[in-house]
Image (tube, coloured by chain):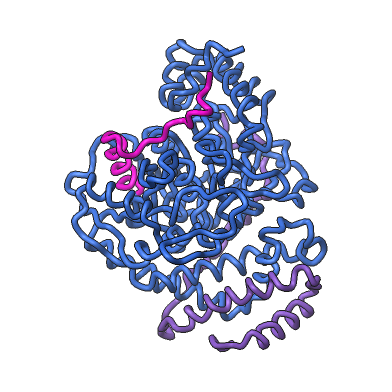
């Protein structure tokens, strides 16, 4: 998406993407969504203007998992309880 | 009727624990005094969303009955947590209406367990911006949290209840989270000390995520020794070899304890201290810049630095936050968007639509920015910047003024914190007073910023400023426990 995308194109993208994702924007919500998406687009333009090399990696790093995780909630009284 | 223990509420956590350990004070009496003060002050402050009176009383009785338990470094100390921390038998609200329908947590968050293992007594859950997406804690479901130093003004956010409860003398210690500034903003506006540790230092197990790529947890306190003590007690890797293994935070670096409390008296002699210019001056009002000047003079700062790529870093934080936060709530945005906080609903909806290419690029820019900033820390040990562009603004205000510029308030209160949490730097916010002649009763925070894993330097500098009397965190006069 171009950094200098027009407001009309942004609005078309928002409506189409919302529809595809099953987000039905109401008339009350839509102006705020367009304003915030426009703000995100301006930040995205700053990101696009930042020079990156093909070997610049993501800050996200995946760590392979050797032991399956426990369920998210544990009973009280684990290692760090009294 | 005031309790005999009430005067102890004016002390810091370390003094309270010492009194409980030596038998001057019972944990039960301290707990009752605390609950009474919360009952009296919370109708005005709205910092607490749940008070755990019976749980706290039971816990205090347990401490009073067991001399071994009473020897803990936080023996009998009341504390409270932002309501995104799991508390057994309560739904974890994360500031929302939607999560009121969630089943109760089956266990306390890991950091709650660590503080209670040191003898502390959990007394409640605290107000916050919904799902931590905000800087004002004007929570439409719970009502706004009010600043103890001026109840017509915001406490900051998203951990507003955590800042207000400490500044209002309700508890000497609280926990919050910081994704883009949510510990440092309320610490600045409420006039208390706040520590955002290095990203990955403290395990987040048992807390409701906002943006897993950026979320940090940390403490608020009225003294630096309390801040360091709580931080030290919460450090350390999660146990991993139990059967069955405990859930672990994949974002936690699982580093061993690096205690800071024993280092506080070292001061800042020999440290290279510099002031952040550029972005951090341009986005700050005159009182905020004045606060930094005072701290710079006190710490002997001699150099001025700029963070390369800082605007790109802030842009990365914004895009990652917007997209990642929304993705976690996509189903609720589809089914019940109008149950979201009206102040953040449209931002969540917009975030759900962000193209993947923007987010992927943001994560690459973030690493590039972190690498560029690392070069600055080859020249300096500690950097100074304002924590917020201005002091606390009136509840309901839509804009803030920086010089001649008027900016939208809710996203702009984090202008000076967001570029630092984006790359996980450890930061201690210290409260400075009297920098705004028009609002002399209001504090403003200064960020003490170090290279990753050097929380010790930020806390040493904070302790030095506290010893000089320049940084201090008094209970707000209208809320002094009686």
Residue B194 relative to residue B376: left or right: right
Q: Residue at x 79, y 67 (%)?
A: B334
Foreground of the two, A11 or B259: A11
Above or below, B306 against B146 in this view is below
User: In this picture, which residue range is highlighted in magenta?
Assistant: B455-482
Figure disc tally: 0
Q: Is residue B35 visible?
A: yes
Residue B346: x, y in percent?
Answer: 69, 66
Asked whether residue B479 is drawn in magenta, I would say yes
* B192 to B6, vertically: above or below: below
Q: Give me the chain that's purple.
A: A
Q: Is residue B68 above or below residue B437?
A: above
Q: Residue at x 52, y 41 (%)?
A: B163
Identify the residue at horizontal 47%, vertical 75% (top origin).
Answer: B364
Image quadrant occupied by the N terminus of chain B: top right
Reply yes or no: does residue B253 show up in magenta: no
């Amino acid at each position: 998406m171009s950094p200098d995308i027009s407001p009309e194109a942004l609005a078309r993208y928002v409506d189409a993407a919302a529809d595809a994702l099953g987000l039905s924007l109401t008339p009350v919500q839509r102006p705020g969504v367009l304003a915030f998406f426009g703000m995100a687009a301006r930040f995205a333009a700053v990101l696009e203007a930042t020079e990156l090399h093909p070997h610049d990696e993501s800050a996200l790093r995946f760590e392979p998992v050797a032991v399956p995780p426990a369920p998210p909630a544990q009973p009280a009284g684990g290692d760090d309880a009294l | 009727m005031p309790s005999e223990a009430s005067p102890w509420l004016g002390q810091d956590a370390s003094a309270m624990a010492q009194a409980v350990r030596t038998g001057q004070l019972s944990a039960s009496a301290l707990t009752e005094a605390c609950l009474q003060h919360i009952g009296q002050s919370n109708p005005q402050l709205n910092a607490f969303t749940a008070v755990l009176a019976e749980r706290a009383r039971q816990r205090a009785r347990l401490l009073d009955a067991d001399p071994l338990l009473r020897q803990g470094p936080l023996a009998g100390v009341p504390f409270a947590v932002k309501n995104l921390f799991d508390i057994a038998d309560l739904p974890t609200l994360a500031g929302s209406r939607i999560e009121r329908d969630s089943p109760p947590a089956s266990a306390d968050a890991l950091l709650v367990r660590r503080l209670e293992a040191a003898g502390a007594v959990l007394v409640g859950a605290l107000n916050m911006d919904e799902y931590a997406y905000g800087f004002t804690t004007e929570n439409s479901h719970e009502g706004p949290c009010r600043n103890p130093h001026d109840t017509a003004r915001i406490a900051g956010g998203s951990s507003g209840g955590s800042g207000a409860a400490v500044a209002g003398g309700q508890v000497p210690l609280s926990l919050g989270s910081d994704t883009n500034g949510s510990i440092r903003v309320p610490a600045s506006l409420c006039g208390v000390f706040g520590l955002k540790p290095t990203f990955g230092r403290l395990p987040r197990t048992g807390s409701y995520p906002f943006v897993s790529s950026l979320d940090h947890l940390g403490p608020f306190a009225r003294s630096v020794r309390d801040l360091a003590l709580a931080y030290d007690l919460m450090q350390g890797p999660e146990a991993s070899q139990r059967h069955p293994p405990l859930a672990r935070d994949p974002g936690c670096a699982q580093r061993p304890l690096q205690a800071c409390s024993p280092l506080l008296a070292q001061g800042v002699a020999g440290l290279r201290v510099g002031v952040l210019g550029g972005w951090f001056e341009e986005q700050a009002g005159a009182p905020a810049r004045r606060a930094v000047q005072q701290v710079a003079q006190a710490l002997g700062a001699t150099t001025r630095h700029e963070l390369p790529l800082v605007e790109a870093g802030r842009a990365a934080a914004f895009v990652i936050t917007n997209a990642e936060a929304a993705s976690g709530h996509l189903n609720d945005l589809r089914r019940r968007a109008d149950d979201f906080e009206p102040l953040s609903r449209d931002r969540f909806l917009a975030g759900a639509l962000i193209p993947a290419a923007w987010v992927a690029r943001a994560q690459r820019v973030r690493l590039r920015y972190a690498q560029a900033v690392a070069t600055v820390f080859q020249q300096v040990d500690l950097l100074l910047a304002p924590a917020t562009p201005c002091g606390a603004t009136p509840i309901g205000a839509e804009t803030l003024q920086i010089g001649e510029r008027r900016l939208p308030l809710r996203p702009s209160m984090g202008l000076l914190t967001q570029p630092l949490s984006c790359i996980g730097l450890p930061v201690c916010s210290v409260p400075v007073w009297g920098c705004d002649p028009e609002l002399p009763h209001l504090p403003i925070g200064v960020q003490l910023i170090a290279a990753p894993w050097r929380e010790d330097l930020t806390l040493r500098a904070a302790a030095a400023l506290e010893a000089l009397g320049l940084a201090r965190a008094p209970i707000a006069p209208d809320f002094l426990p009686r």
